[in-house]
Amino acid sequence: MGMDAFILDPLDQTMMSLATASRTLAGHDEYCMEYITKVREGKIHA
């Protein structure tokens, strides 16, 4: 039992930061490269 899908505003930088961090912490981002790249590009807040 859990959430299969949700609706997220892709323009909300705070929500996108949380979504990216949660993928990283769950082990879905090998070597944290997606997270690091998005922080460097300014797409999310660290």
Image (cartoon, rainbow, N blue to C red):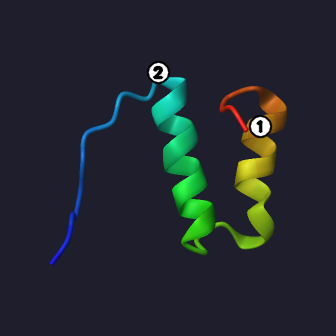
- Extreme-top residue of the structure: 11
Q: Give the Cα distance between marks 2 and 1.
A: 15 Å
| Residue 14 coordinates in the image, percent (x, y) | 52, 29
Question: Could you tell me which quadrant the N terminus lies in?
Answer: bottom left
| Residue 40 coordinates in the image, percent (x, y) | 84, 35
**Badge 1 amino acid:** Val
Residue ID for mark 1: 39
Name which quarter of the figure residue 33 lies in.
Answer: bottom right
Number of numbered labels in the structure image: 2
Tag 1, which secondary structure?
Answer: helix
**Badge 2 amino acid:** Leu
Q: Is residue 39 above or below residue 19?
A: above
For marks 2 and 1 on the same chain, the one whose residue lies earlier in the sequence: 2
| Residue 18 coordinates in the image, percent (x, y) | 52, 44
Q: Residue 11 carries which label?
A: 2
Name which quarter of the figure residue 30 lies in.
Answer: bottom right
Residue that appears at 21% across and 63% down: 3
Name which quarter of the figure residue 26 lies in.
Answer: bottom right
Residue that appears at 66% across and 66% down: 29
- Extreme-left residue of the structure: 1
